[in-house]
Amino acid sequence: MPETRNMAWISVEDALPPMGTTVLAWMPERWAQPYEIVEYSQKSEDHRKFVRRDGQWWHSGKRITHWMSLPSSPIGERED
């Protein structure tokens, strides 16, 4: 049986991903595309890094409210 991961949205009030983990983030204030693949980090070194400040998780002035783990790569495909 292939590996499965939890594909449910997790509130940032309940848990945050481990530092350096890449996840799918939900930002309800971004109406056109409220989700983005991001890396949870304390430093904003490029546009894919998101910063936690004042107990919240932010990107470009938009608050991240939920996140979920990314699925595993397809079976037989290379993971980088």
Image: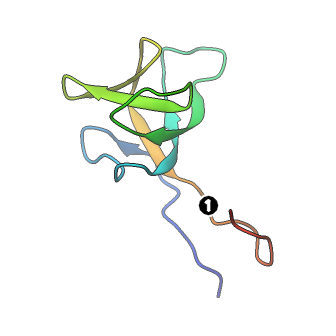
Residue pictured at 37% horizontal, 31% vertical: 43
Residue 20 placement, left or right of 70: left
Q: Which three-letter amino acid code belongs to the residue tagged 1?
A: Pro
Quadrant holding the C terminus:
bottom right
Residue 49 placement, left or right of 17: right
- Above/below status of 25 relative to 27: below
Residue at the spot of label 1: 71
* Residue 27 spot, x, y in % from top left: 48, 24
Along the line of sight, the residue nearer the viewer: 34 or 54? 54
Quadrant holding the N terminus:
bottom right
* Residue 63 spot, x, y in % from top left: 39, 20
Label 1: state its secondary structure: loop
Residue pictured at 52% horizontal, 67% vertical: 5
* Residue 49 spot, x, y in % from top left: 48, 32
* Residue 53 spot, x, y in % from top left: 25, 24
Residue pictured at 66% horizontal, 15% vertical: 32
Q: How many marks?
A: 1
Residue 75 placement, left or right of 8: right
